[in-house]
Image (tube, rainbow, N blue to C red):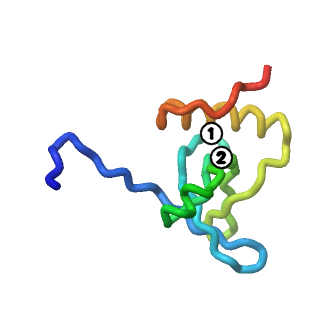
Amino acid sequence: MALNDNEEYYEPDIISVSDDDGNEILFELLERYETDEDVYVAVTRYYETDEEIVDGDFEVITLKVESDENGNEYLVEIEDEMEYEQISDILMAMVEKKYDVEYFEPEQ
């Protein structure tokens, strides 16, 4: 099947994360948001097979990007509830617009 010039393939940005036990977990980067001081990401678990995709929950997770003294980046949970709510609302709005989906209603 030939592709027209205006057809695009979707190629996800994949992030490999090691959990506390050293197991590799793959996440798909959905969106990235930067402030003057911090960087945040919205990710979801990456599924490789059709069966995993069908069974997956596609939960969107909001995390903060931190750097160690060597400049290596890692992801952490956002501890401050107010910061989490604000950043989560921003990232989810970006995800909804980019992927033309609706996940939630922001809390007032």
Q: Nearer the viewer, mark 1 or mark 2?
A: 2
Q: Amino acid at mark 2?
A: Val
Tell me which residue sits at (66%, 54%) in the image: 65
Can you say which quadrant of the picture contains the C terminus? top right
The residue wearing badge 2 is 60
Left or right, residue 93 beside residue 82? left
Q: Where does residue 19 sit, x and y in percent of width and height?
A: 73, 72
At label 1, counting other C-alpha atoms closer than 10 Å, the crowd grade (few under 14, some 14-19, many 20 or more) is: few
> Is 4 on the left or on the right of 21, as rendered?
left
Residue 9, position in %: x, y? 31, 51
Which one is nearer the viewer's eye here, 79 or 19?
19
Q: Residue at x 59, y 30 (%)?
A: 102
The quadrant of the image that shows the N terminus is bottom left
Q: Amino acid at mark 1?
A: Asp
Of the pair 91 and 8, the residue shown nearer to us: 8
Cα separation between marks 1 and 2: 24 Å
- Residue at figure coordinates x 68%, y 78% from the top left: 23
Q: Secondary structure at mark 2?
A: strand
What is the total number of numbered labels drawn onto the structure image?
Answer: 2
Q: Secondary structure at mark 1?
A: loop
The disc label shown at residue 36, or none: 1
Residue under the image location 37 percent in, 51 percent down: 10
Residue 7 % position (x, y): 23, 43
User: On the picture, is 43 further left or further right than 4?
Assistant: right
Residue farthest along the top direction in this orientation: 108
Image x and y of residue 91, in percent = 62, 37
